[in-house]
Amino acid sequence: MSKSSANARPLAEEETVKAQSRRLRGTIASGLADLVTGALSDTDTKLLKFHGAYQQDDRDLRLERQGQRLEPAYEFMVRVRMPGGVCTPAQWQGLTGLARERGNGTLRITTRQTFQFHGILKADLKPLMAELNALGLDSIAACGDVNRNVICHNHPATSPVFREIRAFAADLSAALLPRTAAYRETWLDEPPAEGAGAEEEPLYGPTYLPRKFKIGIAVPPVNDVDVLAQDLGFVAIIEEGGLVGFNVAVGGGMGASHGDRATYPRLADLIGFCAPGQVLAVAEQVMRIQRDHGDRTNRRHARLKYTLDDRGVAWFKAELEDRLGFALEPVRDIHFESRNDRFGWVEDDEGRLHLTLRALAGRLQDEPECRRLTALAEVARIHDGDFRLTPNQNLTISGVRPGRKSVIEAVLARHGVPIPAEPEEGERRHAIACVSLPTCGLAMAEAERALPGFLERLEGVLRPLGLSGEPISVRVSGCPNGCARPRLAEIGLVGKSLGRYILYLGGGFAGERLNTAYRENLSLEEVIAALTPLLADYAVRREPSERFGDFVIRAGYLTAPDLSGNPSTTQEMPL
Ligand code: SRM
Ligand code: SF4
C-alpha cells in the first residue's frame, strides 16, 4: 500500500485517543478512584498501556460470571521496564513481595527480559505502581505505541562486553522514554507542573508512534534476543576483545492475523554498521522515520516492517542516512551459533560464578514439589551479585562469590528447585510459551498451560530415538501475534482455536530463517503424531551436526506451498 492511499483513509481510533489524552493522562486517575466497577473506561484502558499496564479479565471465569450476571472478573497485568533484564537482589525480594501482596502470587518472566504481574485488582493497581517505583523500577512505556523494554544478551561468560552492552540497553531505554509527567502524576501523586497535559514530546510528538517499537542488542555467537525479530536490532561487533560497533538491522516483527495475507512475520534487514557513539542517534532517527511514515490508519499495518516493505529498504536507508547526516559503514561479518541459554554454573574470567536456571514458560511460583518463588526470594536475601532475566524466559543468579555456591545450592535444593546440568533433555530447556489463557484477551488456544504436557509427550517420542539431548527449539503461542516468537522456532505451534494449532517447521537454529506451515488445525495429540515420523527419520538420516530445522527442509518435508501464504518465509538472513 502506498503512503498516499494510507493517508486517504481515516486515522485509526487510537490516534484520536492519543491526541486527546492530554499526553497520556486521559481520565485514568479518576477512573481508578471509582470502585463501583473493576474496570476502567475503554479510552483509559488504551492509555493505560503506555503506563505499562493492561486491563484483562480472567477468561476461565467468563461464562460463570455471565451466568451470574456479574461483570467479567476484571484484573490488571503490569509489565516492568527492566532494560537488559537486570535487577538487584533487593529489587527481586521487593518484586516477589508485590506479586504476593498485590498480584496472583506469581511472577512471570517475559520473552523481553522483564517481569509481569498478573491478577492485580483495580484497588491494588496504584499502590503496586508506587511500591514498584520505590524499588527503583517502573513500568513507563513497557507497553503502548512507544519504544518498549530494550533487551540484550547478558550472560557474562558469553558476553565479555556485558557491562557496555547493558549500558547501551539502559541508555537507549532512558533516551527513548516519553517526556510526559502523566505517569508520575497518576501513580506517584506528583503535583501537575505548569503546562501539564501539553508537555513537549520532542521525540514522539503528541500522538507518539503509530504502533509499538522494539529494540534488541545481540552479542554473537548467541542470538538469544532474536535480533531479526526486532524493529531495530543491533549486533555487537567485537574485535580483539573490545566492542568496535554494531551492525544495524531494521524491520523485524512476528505478528500476523490468521487469514489476512497482508499481515506477516518478517525478518529484519541488515543495513549497515555504526560506531558505538552513533547508536543513540541511529535509534532516534529510525524511530522518527517510523513516527513520520508509519501507517496511522490501520493498526494491523502500522509496524516498521510494513513501512519498509511499502517504501523499500533502499529508501529507508537513504532517509536514515539523510537524517543522521552520515552514512552507515558496510555490514561487518557476523556469525551466530545458537539462541539458547547456557544452563547450570559457569565461571567467568574474574572467578565469579553465574547460575542459569530454567523457569518453564517463565512462570515463577510455588508449587508443592518446587517452590521457585520462595527459593529465589531466599537466594536474594543472601546474594550480593545481581539477577538477570533471559529472552528465553529463564534467569541467571549472577556474580556469585565462590564461597556462596554451596549455600545457594542448599537453598534451591531445600525448595525442590532443580539445577540443570549439561547435557539435559533438550526440548524442556529450550522451549518457550507465551502467557495465553486465562489472562490474555487475544488468546485462541492454550500456550503456557499446555507446554509442560506437550513437552512430556514430545520427550516420550524423542527418548527412544536417542534425541533427548538435541537442542531443538520448540515455541508455542496461543495466537498468531507470536509473543513466543514461534515463527522462528524449529518446531512452532500457533493457536488457531481452542485445542487446535498450526504446526510450523523448519525455522533456523540461530534465528536466521522463519519456519513454514506444515499442517493446520491439529490437536496436540495430532501434532505429536505428525512429528513422530519426521523425528524418526531425523534420528536415522541426519548429517553430523545437522539441526532439525535444516533437516526437514533438506529431506523435502516442506515442499508443499506454505499454508500461511506468508511472502517472507523463504527469506534467510546471513547470520
Ligand atoms: Fe506480546 C499483545 C504478552 C512479547 C507480539 N502480548 C500482547 C498482549 C499484551 C495481549 C493484548 O494485547 O491484549 C499479551 C499479554 C498477555 C498476558 O496475559 O500477559 C502479550 N508479549 C507478551 C509476553 C508477556 C509473552 C510472554 O509470554 O513472554 C511478552 C512480553 C514482552 C515484554 O516484556 O515486553 C510478549 N509480543 C511479544 C513478542 C516477542 C518480542 O517482542 O520479542 C512479540 C513478537 C514480536 C513483535 O512485536 O512483532 C509480540 N504481542 C504481540 C502482538 C503482535 C504485534 C503485531 O505487530 O502484530 C500483540 C497484539 C497487538 O499488539 O495488537 C501482542
Ligand atoms: Fe496472547 Fe497471542 Fe501473545 Fe500469546 S501470542 S500472549 S495468545 S497475544
Image (cartoon, helix red, strand yellow):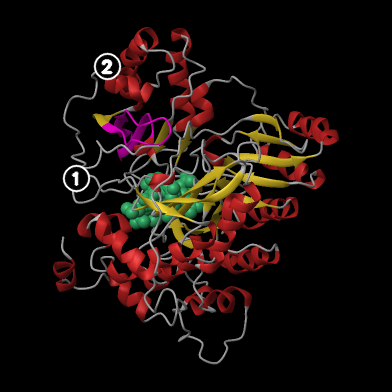
Residue at the far right in the pictured view: 403
When asked about the image quadrant of residue 239, the answer is top right
Camera-nearest residue between 535 and 147: 147
Rounded to the nearest angstrom, the CA distance separating label 1 from label 2 is 28 Å
How crowded pointer 1 is (Cα within 10 Å; few <14, some 14-19, many 20+) is rated as few
Residue 506 on the magenta span: yes
Compared across the picture, whether 452 is left or right of 42 comes to right
- Identify the disc placed on residue 555: 2
Tag in front: 1 or 2: 2
Q: Which of the marked residues, 1 or 2, is nearer the chain's N terminus?
A: 1
- Secondary structure beneath label 2: loop
In the rendered image, residue 248, in percent from the top left (x then y), is placed at: 42, 52
Compared across the picture, whether 394 is left or right of 413 comes to left
On screen, 370 above or below 51? above
Q: Is residue 102 visible?
A: yes
When asked about the image quadrant of residue 24, the answer is bottom left
In the rendered image, residue 432, in percent from the top left (x then y), is placed at: 47, 36
Q: Which residues are magenta?
A: 489-516
In the rendered image, residue 226, in percent from the top left (x then y), is placed at: 44, 42
Compared across the picture, whether 29 is left or right of 388 comes to left
Q: Is residue 440 visible?
A: no
Q: Would you name the residue on which mark 1 appears? A: 259
On screen, 239 above or below 168? above
Residue 126 on the magenta span: no
